[in-house]
Image: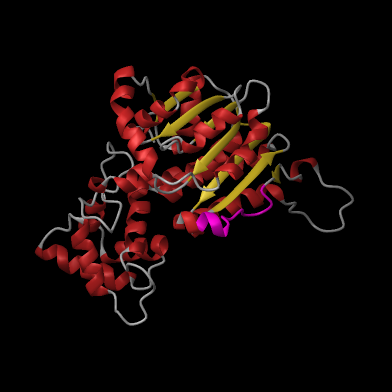
Amino acid sequence: MADEKASVEDIAPGAIARAADITDGIAARIHRPVLLDECVDLLLPAGRRPDPVIVDCTLGLAGHSLAFCEAAPAARLIGIDRDKEALELAARRLSAHADRFTPVHASFARFAAVLDELGIDEVDGAFLDLGLSSLQIDEKDRGFAYSADGPLDMRMDAAQPLTAADVLASYSVDGLTRVFRDYGQERWARRIAQAIAEQRQREPLEHASQLVDLIDRAVPRRNRPAGNPAKRVFQALRIEVNGELDELRSVLPQIALRLAVGGRIVVESYHSLEDRITKRFFVRGSRVDMPRGMPQIPEGLRPYFRDVSHGAVKAGKDEIAGNPRSGSVRLRAVELTLPLPPAVRNEMLRDIELAEQRKEKRR
């Protein structure tokens, strides 16, 4: 969008030093990145190309990026994150590779703008680890976790205006129902939305504990699924506040349009909706859509993606036992095998425009 700008961060040494103790403390608490070896193996061929450029679109605490840098010592790494605190912490962790690491403060939906600002025409690999980072989960004042009280914020970028409290205060019952149903797959979406509308007439919903209590009262106890009934609603609010699905629909074609032939896109999803968007985008470029019996495939209809992950890679029992969050992961990767046909490029440009229009409408 016009008012969003990518910002190449010049992380000052003082900021890195101040972040050192925080980073080391967080690193000691967080789990090893999910499917780390598999992610590195899928992206590594891109890092072995001449003068490779790799973009980590979801830098976070740089767990994956650190492994990429160590495995591909000739690669230049661009790290994108819309959380400025995460950028400082990541810079600390990647200080040994500072000569080939560029941190950028932006949403990954600004992928093309970031490359333009850096004077980069094409990249050899791009990685996305979707969902929340460990930093965001750990910070109680961000309001992401239903298990800890805090303000209902949920912004991944603190500079953006829309918060979860704003959504709860301003959306209609139909709007809230749509969010909870579509993004949280919540069975009792309308009932919860109606309870919110009634509650906000008496007092604003501003803290996580208020919303958790409301959901507990609104959702019938009979046949409740396992776990906290607030889980789906908090997930749905986070996705709505940050426009996560529209940003994913925007960034995938942006990456493909700037990917060198032989380059790779690697995506980790933790939500069925994210995985569905990724799968459909990859499958669209991996299959031939033409009548049977034709003697040969016309040039413009040839598959331009090769499935290098062979479907979705899932975490094994041992990894799930050590990190339950990994149980929902789906890892997919494709390689660009030939230049995108003009018709495909035009279709991807239309997809980007539609995703941006949906984001504007949401705001």
**The magenta stretch spans which residues?**
309-320
Locate residue 38, reporting x and y percent.
61, 45
What's the residue at 29%, 79% (across, down)?
220
Q: Nearer the viewer, residue 348 or 102?
A: 102
Q: Is residue 11 above or below residue 233?
A: above
- Mark yes or no: residue 117 visible: no
Locate residue 193, reporting x and y percent.
27, 67
Left or right side of 259 for 189: left
Q: Is residue 212 above or below residue 128?
A: below
Q: Nearer the viewer, residue 61 or 302?
A: 61
Residue furthest right as drawn: 295
Residue furthest bottom as drawn: 222
* Quadrant (top left, top right, bottom left, bottom right) of the N terminus: top left
Q: Nearer the viewer, residue 269 or 159?
A: 269
Q: Is residue 181 magenta?
A: no
Q: Is residue 313 magenta?
A: yes
What's the residue at 33%, 82% (across, down)?
222
Locate residue 134, reporting x and y percent.
38, 45
Left or right side of 229 for 170: left
When asked about the image quadrant of residue 311, the answer is: bottom right
| Colour logic | secondary structure
Locate residue 320, reporting x and y percent.
51, 57
Q: Is residue 300 above or below residue 259?
A: below
Q: Nearer the viewer, residue 109 or 271?
A: 271
Left or right side of 125 for 304: right
What's the residue at 33%, 62% (across, down)?
233
Q: Is residue 349 above or below residue 291?
A: above
